[in-house]
Image (cartoon, helix red, strand yellow):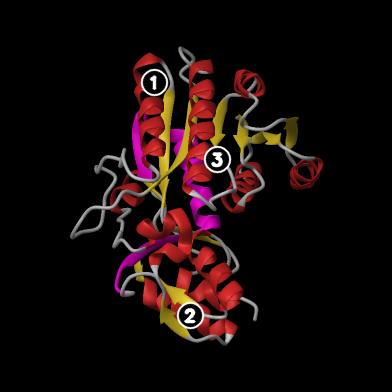
Amino acid sequence: MRVFVTGGTGTIGSAVVAELLANGHTVLALARSDASAQALKAAGAETLPGTIADLDVLRAGAAHSDGVISLAFGRDYASPEALAASITEESAAMAALGQELIGTDRPIVTVSGTPWVPGRASTEADPAPTDGPVGGRGRSVNALLELAARGVRATAVRMPRTVHNNGEGGFAGLLTDHARRTAVAGYPGDGTQRWPAVHALDAAVLFRLALESAPAGTLWHAVADEGDAVLDIATAIGRQLGLPVQPVPQESFGPFGVIFAMDQPASSAHTRQALNWRPTHPSLLDDLKNIQP
């Protein structure tokens, strides 16, 4: 299958590109810079110059491929306004890709986040949140999945709070960045709240499985660790960096603060059974041992 991939140089995307190529697919990847293009070509992918704001480029990439994996998202999370702008940009890109595939029965796999459900681990059957700081992502994913009725094999892989590789990435990575800046391994809330996690290489396998065989209109959970206590995550970071571990105001983490403070475990039992997905790479707490002082 010739697969058009956006966001192919990120923590998840680079793993997805490698997974696709290793399993007999070819990849056409969106490249927003010369550096991105060089990295993608070195991995074995073809490249298409552009960004997710270039909707005509996205349509062309989708039109000349057998399937699409949409992973690109803005990098600026410093303010609520910046986060909202990234979500708006992603929503427009997803709509353009989906519209291009109407009537083709070709697959498109997009990325979203696992929902949070008070008192229990969320499951694939739970709806995406459509309000709050990231509610726009839920709305755009729902719109894409509705294209299943119009001849698009649209599916979504919902990612946990931390997608990690070699001790980096996700919410845990943001805690590490904050610790390096402030000389304190800080955490929001009381530390008992739980965050799910997955190794990027395991997540990449699930994206490939969804692309190859997931039915239209379905949701999947790329969750390997159902929920690590945030205090345990901060303690692991503090141990590696030689820093004290203590609570800090959730406002210290900008627009993500309110999300950081929530208990949000997630299950992947249905995904594992239905798609025969079996995570095999290190857990988050084990992978954090790779953080360099």
In the foreground, 144 or 180: 180
In the image, what residue occupies the spot 47% across and 62% down?
253
Query: Is residue 188 placed above or below 273 in the rendered structure?
Result: below
Q: In the displayed image of the protein, which residue is found farthest to the top?
A: 103
Image quarter hosting the C terminus: bottom right
Q: Which residue is mark 1?
A: 147
Where is residue 278 shown, x and y percent of the image? 42, 56
In the foreground, 41 or 257: 257
Amino acid carrying mark 2 in the image? Ala
Where is residue 77 shown, x and y percent of the image? 53, 51
- Asked if residue 4 can be seen in this view, the reply is yes
Q: In the displayed image of the protein, which residue is found farthest to the left?
A: 119
| Secondary element type, mark 1 | helix
| Secondary element type, mark 2 | helix
* Region of the chain picked out in magenta, as a range: 192-220
Q: Which residue is mark 2?
A: 236
